[in-house]
Image (cartoon, rainbow, N blue to C red):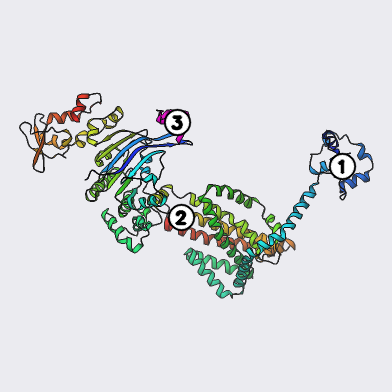
Amino acid sequence: MSDTIKVSIRNLYKIFGDDPQGALAKVREGMTKADLLEQENHVLGLNDINVDMKEGQITVIMGLSGSGKSTLIRHLNRLIEPTAGEVLVNGEDILAYSEAQLRQLRRVNMSMVFQKFALLPHRTVLENAGMALATQGISREDYESEARKWLDRVGLAGQDDQYPHQLSGGMQQRVGIARALASNSDIMLMDEAFSALDPLIRTDMQDLLLELQAELHKTIVFITHDLDEALKLADHLVILKDGAVVQQGEPQKILLAPADPYIEDFVADINRARVLRVRSVMEPGEGGPSAGDVAPNDNLESLIARSEGAVDRSFRVVKDGAVIGHITMADVMRALVPRRSSDESAQDKAA
Amino acid sequence: MATYDGLFDTLGLREWCDGGASDGPMSMADLLAKTKGGDAAASSSTPLRDLPFPSLDALHDACGAIPQTRDLTQGLEAGFLAIRDALRIVVDPLTQPLSWMLREMLWVMTATPWWIMVPILLLITWAVARSWKIVGFVALVIGLLAFVDHYDVAMQTLAIIFVCAFICVLFGVPIGIAMSRSDRMQNIVTPILDMLQTLPPFVYLIPLIFLFSVTEPKLYGIAVILYAIVPVVRLTNLGIRLVDKDVIEAADAFGMTNRQKLFGVQIPLALPNIMAGVNQTIMMSLAMVVIASMVSAPGLGILVLRGIRNLELGVGLVAGFGIVVLAIALDRVTKASLARIDASQANR
């Protein structure tokens, strides 16, 4: 995992309406989304978005419906044109791209997975998986092996000649993922890719994605409205509300130190013991007498199980044989209680 | 003298009116009024109940400079006749291939012996519909028509429909595609389609009779095509516009060019709708080919016309029944092929 910034969004605005530029000036003067709709009859889709997406990471953009997350992801490959701002991919501003350059970007650098799968209903599974390659002008014989390889990889071996409507939703989305992977693009955009699937299948697909990511290290931009999904997948979490970024950062940090009441409400129903990791709660140093060793990525739930209910124990945190800190059960208990953003001391401690 | 005299007098137009006083032929009404005697002039104060609508004719009575309605129709006719020759020079060569196609097709379908022609037709049916039931039904229909000695006329009707439906698809599908890609194009073409659809079929024939000689097959060919092209254009446009937005977005996201999108996604997905349009087009050309028998289109329509003209009830009824079974056969065949296309891509 490198720290290279792959995709960067700078001061991005999107306003829907007849005169977006006029409305933009008003927004920059500080008009709110509600006022803009009421007084100017324009919809503020995105309001001054700044996000950096690092290479090889999963950036999850989360928000409720209407928060602008689907609009935002469509700016990354210019399916929607922004009103103002910049989108930098590999350091180049794609808004300055010509049509041919843009097409090249969509064919080679970016692939997309859709909420409603959006497979071609008149093409077989194999042809769908090879769609990106066929679009690049590669003949069927040449893309067949590549498409088949990715179909096998997502668990769809032997379904080549089926049509999408013959498959279940989960399988259709596997085709969607195989299609995106087969293009060999280094950026993958996933627009609520698992939202239309039932919970069990969704968990399967999340595991599949994490498994593939561990191997492929793509730059993934994942849109979701489901916090559990976001926490599970995210390396970097961006929370959108009414078209603006409310908070972004490492998911554990957001959980421990929510920036405003909106996010507090959001994270209130989360099973914190399962989501929080030892590394986010631990203190540096060896600490007192240790009851055992734990890994930094263990979740608190497993720690509680190991403590057998005793609240006075302390564990050493060991990574690759070296002690990197310690964690007391008192820390664990404190971390399990959702903190209010007003509680300054707690915030400092977590940060 | 006339009701609206006062109007022109008060407007001070009397001089202009009299200046252009018509020395045209006297109308029957004028003549009658004259023979009735001088009291027409006396009744210049018409009771309100009898006030005529200020139409061209009524105004002409008061003011000779205003033309009568018959001048309008005559003017149209004269105008049409004036541009006719110029129009012919352009339209004649353009439409000549249609005449050839119709003539050749008619010749092929009637000159080929029935024991070759019928199997060929059944083979086409099989190729399109892939159903033995339909093939059997078509064989039954042709057999029935041939049994009552209507084989030749039925083949003539079929020949005309094949040629006209083919040309309708040839032009209709591209027009429909153009409409689906531009809203402006759609706004221009839709009123024309509306007009073609609502214009009584007989009205098509009037200018065509003036334009082409009645012996030319293209005369009825054009009439049939104009009438029958509407559904295929409309449904192509509709079909492409109805293609799932998500799929189109996916095509864009993977960097398809417009051309790849059109031929790889939009047309294949719109095909069931386009085929429904083709089905309607064939049905409508069958309807029109009967009416076109008035301008010498051969086929079953001629017999229907004979039934009407000579009051030969039996001839008209048998021919009419023949048209019905032919229509059913054509409809079943195209519907079966439509169902086949639909099943093979099964729109989710």
Residue B183, x across and y down, in percent = 53, 47
Going by the numbered disc 3, the residue's amino acid type is Leu
**Residue under the image location 29 percent in, 40 percent down:** A52
Relative to A127, is B187 on the left or the right? right
* Badge 1: chain ID: B
Say which mark, if any, is on residue B253. none
Label 3 – label 2 distance at C-alpha: 37 Å
> Which residue is tagged 1?
B18
Q: Are marks 1 and 3 in contact (CB under 8 Å)?
A: no
Task: Determine which residue is flagged by label 2.
Answer: B262
Compared to residue B143, the image places residue A104 above or below, namely: above
Quadrant where the N terminus of chain B is found in the figure: top right
Magenta segment, principal secondary structure? helix
Q: Amino acid type of disc 1?
A: Asp
Question: Residue drawn 41% across and 42% down?
Answer: A81
Give me the disc on residue A37: 3
| Chain letter for the residue marked with disc 2 in the picture | B
The number of numbered badges drawn on the structure is 3
Does dot 3 land on a helix, a strand or a loop? helix
- Alpha-carbon span between mark 2 and mark 1: 66 Å
**Mark 1 or 3, closer to the camera:** 1
Q: As shown in the figure, which amino acid type bears the numbered disc 2?
A: Leu
* Mark nearer the viewer, 2 or 1: 1
Magenta-highlighted residues: A21-40
Q: How many residues crowd around disc 2 within 10 Å: few (fewer than 14), some, or many (20 or more)?
A: some
Q: Chain of mark 3?
A: A
Dot 3: within a 10 Å radius of its alpha carbon, few (fewer than 14), some, or many (20 or more) residues? some
**Is any part of residue B313 visible from this angle?**
no
Structural distance between the alpha carbons of marks 1 and 3? 66 Å
